Image (tube, rainbow, N blue to C red):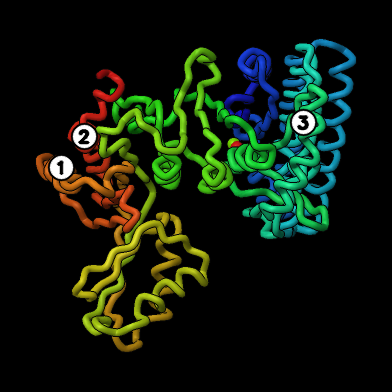
Amino acid sequence: MKFGGSSVASAERIKNVADRVKGNGKGHQVVVVCSAMGDVTDELLALCADASKGMEKPVEERLASIRETHLAALTATVSDKAVRRQVLGMLNVTLSQLEKLARGSTVLGELTPRSKDAILACGERLSNPIVMGALIERGMDAVYMTGGEAGIMTDDRFGDATPLMEVTKFQVKEKLAPLLAEGKTPVVTGYIGATQRGDITTLGRGGSDFTGTTIAAAIDADEVWIWSDVDGLMTADPRIVPDARVLREISYEEAGEMAVFGAKALHPRTLEPVAEKGIPVRFRNTFKPEDPGSLVKKNPRLYAKNVVKAVALVKEVAVITVAGASMVGKPGSAARIFEVMGRIGINVLMISQSVSESNISMVVARSSMEKGANALELALLGQGGYRHILTEDDVSAIAIVGGAMRTTMGVASTAFGAISAKRINIKMIASGSSNQNLSLIVAEKDAKDTVRAIHSAFKLDKLNSR
Ligand code: ASP
Ligand code: MG
């Protein structure tokens, strides 16, 4: 069971988590993985920024507030004195390490990626012991450990580390299987691992989901339950489409397409470890213990007639177009463009080039548009072939997702028909050959209407009501 930041955001919620583990976990052996409380990771990031600028006062204020938040949460969560003392001991170790790290970097006015990860990891190292305490108080034999202690070994790309899967699976199983066999409930920090040398690493924002599925693959879990404060994966964002429906079943590939496009902000690699083994993943609402949520599995049958299952909106994107008639018929022109983007570390979300080859458009996060366009100008303009570089930042991306799109005709025409009926112009289209995702770019002001038009064109509001 994995619980996200909002599920452990307060003492009240942590108690609810413990009830879910105890109640819904009855009859199962459970491993618990939790994120940092609420937006503590964001606070730690802000702390890192202040420390690396040598800003002593804000650093001290943030440290005090983080200490205060967790000590108050502990007091309000755990009433048994002995248990509280045990957890307090753990929190104090982490808090004093955090303070040393933060003060050290403040003095230096510098923060290495390695120290930054050690700081970011403190969020999970503070929330999970409290959860452990709540479980012990409910009579469970819970044991706390960090991801590294549980056996998650990663490469040393601090900030976005990847587990070395084979070693990790072996170590995690060695470590956790005996505990489970003894009836214990391991409580493992999400988001963090350790390098071979023992340095703490983080798996990238939202990485606790990935921790959960990695552990599941290692111990051959029957299911992974990802608990949050939403009902499951949905046909659309309910804030945009009020009659969006919960998808009761969906494939790994479809869920993966939704994840990439942030329908629910899933860590992009979440499903890798479990898809391989066919371990089902269930998304559930912590406040609705009876609700089964959404099940991600192999070959779902439930919506066999629904070609399209979800439509997602990706905000804060921008289009960069490289144009020039003499790119035509010149092998290597695309490679040079993407080499530039790769070199400066910009992730390209979507690509399109018409067969005339006279321009190549790509979609990037809006925050990296300027940097990308500048780098492309420096690298390409003035060299034969590339004429100009255009940018558009008032756009949104829309992803239409569905496994059966591969084998069904007419999806594009239905979608485009619905969009043109709203008199909305489509600026760019891309569809990979896996064909489970058709992506569009429209003007930002039209984005929500586009999502609604597609949602109703594919009758997604009627899902589950047959
Ligand atoms: N606490 C980390 C984050 O906010 C990891 C997670 O929540 O999954 O990104
Ligand atoms: Mg979080």
For residue 416, above or below residue 338: above
On residue 67, the disc is: 3
- In the picture, the quarter occupied by the N terminus is top right
The residue tagged 1 is 414
Residue 238 in the image: x percent, y percent? Answer: 35, 27
Structural crowding at the residue carrying mark 3, measured as other residues with C-alpha within 10 Å and reported as few (<14), some (14–19) or many (≥20): many
Structural crowding at the residue carrying mark 2, measured as other residues with C-alpha within 10 Å and reported as few (<14), some (14–19) or many (≥20): many
Q: Mark 1 falls on what kind of element? A: helix
In which of the image's four quarters is ligand 1 placed?
top right
Q: Earlier in the sequence, mark 1 or mark 3?
A: 3
Position of 288 with respect to 393 (left or right) is: right
The type of residue carrying mark 2 is: Phe
Q: Identify which residue, 267 or 175, lies in the foreground.
A: 175
Q: Mark 2 falls on what kind of element? A: loop
**Cα distance between the residues tagged 1 and 3:** 55 Å
Whether residue 41 is visible: no
The residue tagged 2 is 458
The type of residue carrying mark 1 is: Thr
